[in-house]
Image (cartoon, helix red, strand yellow):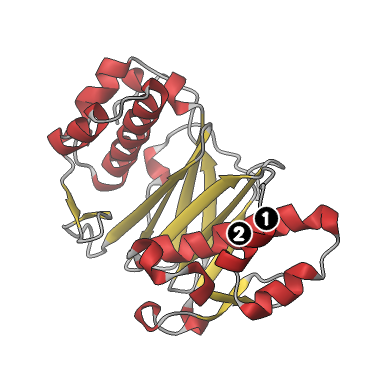
């Protein structure tokens, strides 16, 4: 799936059960005035940004959270800096209130140059994106991430496909873990994928519910990245859009 929409239009911010929207952006920390972006955040987010000592990490965090607030504003009609977020015991942010009778859910993932922000309703929802790269101890990582059955399939692959398939497995499992919300304690190797392409869950920890209820959808984010969406409801429609190349300071929805 290739993102095709490059402008923010309020008519496109309508969600219903079974519909997922994913927004993709590149090099967000290079957009807009850092001080203007910083002011969009709430006090807790500003404090978290202040604790980041590496300039690039701080700029990326501020830009990602500012974009999240701008998009949440478009979906809810609430002014960006008035969006109220709560956090569960594992630190996952969420909106406490319902809008139009729906619980709006969201999740964010980023690499050094790319960000994905996903939105859905009344469900668990997770997204993950990774840059494909060489891994020094690939076999060791596979032992940590994959179930015994998955390792058998992976080891039979041609050498030139192993990195690519490993990152596909990684983002699918990470998306499930992020959707469930308890972090690494859930355990990647405990999330078992099946099928010829290892592209759907066949066994998940009890806290996730039935594996058959989950949807795993890969996203096309270029040849150098792997990305996936996970949600515990059937997906009727997945809309993948690009964030506009507009300085954030000039875009106040």
Q: Position of residue 10 (x, y in %)?
A: 37, 39
Mark 2: few/some/many CA within 10 Å (<14, 14-19, 20+): few
Asked if residue 221 lies left or right of residue 11, the reply is right
What is the secondary structure assignment of the residue under circle 2?
A: helix
Q: Quadrant of residue 28?
A: top left
* Front position in the image: 179 or 146: 146
Q: Position of residue 236 (x, y in %)?
A: 52, 68
Residue 216: mark: none
Res. 192 in view = yes
User: What's the residue at 29%, 43% (across, down)?
Assistant: 72
Residue 141: mark: 2
Q: Which residue is mark 1?
A: 138
Placement of the C terminus among the 4 image quadrants: top left
Q: CA distance from mark 2 to mark 1?
A: 5 Å
Q: Is residue 76 above or below residue 233?
A: above
User: What's the residue at 20%, 24% (across, down)?
Assistant: 39
Asked if residue 96 lies left or right of residue 118, the reply is left
Asked if residue 196 lies left or right of residue 39, the reply is right
User: What's the residue at 34%, 27% (across, down)?
Assistant: 58
Res. 196 in view = no
* Front position in the image: 111 or 4: 111
* Front position in the image: 95 or 129: 129
Q: Position of residue 165 (x, y in %)?
A: 71, 59
Mark 1: few/some/many CA within 10 Å (<14, 14-19, 20+): few
Q: Quadrant of residue 8?
A: top left
Circles 2 and 1 in contact, beta carbons < 8 Å? yes
Q: Is residue 125 above or below residue 189?
A: above
Image label count: 2
Asked if residue 216 lies left or right of residue 102, the reply is right
Q: Position of residue 121 (x, y in %)?
A: 34, 63
What is the secondary structure assignment of the residue under circle 1?
A: helix
Q: Is residue 132 above or below residue 177?
A: above
């Amino acid at each position: 799936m290739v993102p095709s929409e490059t402008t923010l239009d309020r008519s496109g911010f309508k969600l219903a059960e079974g519909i997922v929207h994913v927004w993709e952006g590149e090099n967000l920390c290079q957009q807009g005035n850092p001080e203007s972006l910083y002011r969009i955040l709430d006090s807790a987010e500003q404090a978290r940004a202040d604790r980041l000592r590496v300039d690039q990490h701080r700029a990326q965090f501020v830009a990602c959270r500012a974009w999240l607030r701008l998009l949440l504003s478009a979906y809810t009609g609430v002014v960006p800096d008035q969006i109220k977020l709560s956090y569960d015991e594992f630190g996952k942010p969420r909106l406490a209130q319902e809008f139009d009778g729906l619980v709006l859910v969201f999740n964010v993932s980023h690499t050094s140059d790319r960000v994905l922000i996903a939105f859905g309703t009344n469900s668990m929802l997770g997204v993950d994106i990774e840059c494909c790269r060489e891994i020094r101890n690939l076999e060791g990582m596979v032992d940590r991430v994959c179930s015994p059955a998955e390792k058998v399939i992976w080891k039979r692959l041609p050498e030139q496909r192993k990195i690519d398939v490993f990152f596909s497995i990684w983002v699918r499992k990470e998306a499930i873990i992020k959707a469930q919300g308890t972090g690494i304690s859930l355990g990647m190797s405990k999330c078992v994928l099946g099928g010829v392409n290892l592209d759907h869950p066949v066994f998940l920890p009890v806290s996730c519910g039935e594996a058959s209820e989950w949807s795993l959808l890969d996203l096309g984010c270029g040849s150098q990245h792997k990305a996936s969406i996970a949600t515990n409801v059937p997906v009727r429609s997945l809309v993948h859009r690009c964030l506009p190349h507009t300085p954030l300071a000039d875009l106040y929805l």
